[in-house]
Amino acid sequence: MKDGKVDLVVGEQCALVWYAKKTGMQDQLRILPKPLYEEGQYMSFTDLDKNAQLIADFQQALAEFKKTEAYAAILKKWETGDYELPVIETPN
């Protein structure tokens, strides 16, 4: 991108914004108005019957962690922050 040899990059928005900020190219970054695809993030456990308590404990710990300042700091670090991402104009 910096050398003008790349016209398009496909990737996860958070990572692309982070890289653009890190390299000083945030003014060159444009976002499609609609994602090409969306995918959730998942965690898997084997043998649900044997691990029911582990799953419940994990879900409870995660819910509690999401209420902490440490979690908020992680989100702030990896979010796009207050940077407004320009959206590519597309014809209707």
Image (cartoon, grey):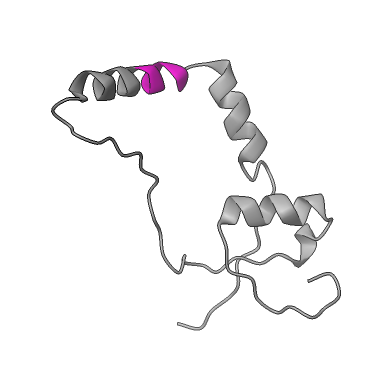
In this rendering, position of residue 11 left or right of residue 45: right
In this rendering, position of residue 42 left or right of residue 4: left
The magenta-colored residue range is: 61-66
Q: Position of residue 80 (x, y in %)?
A: 64, 46
Any part of residue 5 in sight: yes
The residue positioned 74% from the left and 78% from the top of the image is 6
Report the predominant secondary structure element of the magenta stretch.
helix
The residue positioned 38% from the left and 17% from the top of the image is 61
Q: Residue furthest bottom?
A: 91
Q: Does 24 lie within the magenta span?
A: no
Task: Compare residues 59 and 53 and report the one nearer the observer.
Answer: 53
Give the quarter of the image for residue 46: top left
Q: Position of residue 28 (x, y in %)?
A: 76, 67
Above or below, 12 relative to 68: below
Quadrant where the N terminus is found in the figure: bottom right
Above or below, 39 relative to 61: below
Above or below, 47 relative to 54: below
